[in-house]
Image: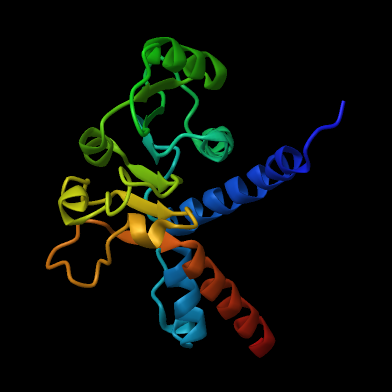
Amino acid sequence: PFQPAFPRFFLTIFPPVADTAVLLVLMAMRRAGEAIKLVQDGQWPQTPWSPFLLTGPALSRASLTIGFLGFGRISQCTLHRLLAFTQPPTSATPPPRCIYTSSRARSNQGEIDQEHTRKFGVEVTRVEAQVLAAQSDVLIVLCSLNESTKGMVNEAFLNLMKRDSVLINVARVSTEVIVSLASFAYCPLRVLLSTRTLSQTLCGIQRSLRQV
């Protein structure tokens, strides 16, 4: 029977977007942007060496909590990829876990989360937005724009986040989901990365390579 073209198209774009999300997470947590800027500014030779220079927090740390604002197929593809970088659970090391928020809790939400937990091999739980902000070590924005998400990531949301947490912006419409940080007197986040930042960074890498 005839199948419309768009489902197949969307299935083909899920993995590339998930790959980009993982790239942004690694760049943020391992401070790649700062390292690239040092090279571009000619400051790398003068930078004192240390074993953990510009490494940042690790995805392999114990009790890592990965959060998603929106948990559709791209978020699930992203989680599958990120788990490869996390610490395998042992008796001495708590495993990573995933929390997410969605537009609303379903009547069978417990069953849905149990299926996600079985599928990914780590605890996956839907939580409310305030809990998502407060508990996530890495928070990835991958939601659609609607009345419930518009302006959701605002000053109050950010002030709930941990001081060393990382916010990754991948959603196409996230300029309306995430309120501008420019007017915030205080922001606990170490890094905010977006697909626009990635584009600027990659252009910077190309310029640096041409200078070598």
Give the x, y percent position of residue 160: 17, 45
**In the rendered image, which quarter contains the N terminus?**
top right
Relative to 171, 130 lies left or right: left
User: How many numbered discs sit on the rendered protein?
Assistant: 0
Give the x, y percent position of residue 159: 16, 51
**In the rendered image, which quarter contains the C terminus?**
bottom right
Give the x, y percent position of residue 28: 43, 58
Residue projecting furthest to the right = 1
Relative to 17, 190 lies left or right: left
The residue lying at 51 percent from left, 80 percent from top is 39
Is 187 placed above or below 132 here? below
The residue lying at 25 percent from left, 35 percent from top is 135
| Residue 51 is at least partly visible in this image | no
Relative to 137, 82 lies left or right: right
Is 124 placed above or below 191 here? above
Give the x, y percent position of residue 88: 50, 25
Color scheme of the displayed model: rainbow
| Residue 203 is at least partly visible in this image | yes
Residue projecting furthest to the left = 185
The residue lying at 35 percent from left, 25 percent from top is 126
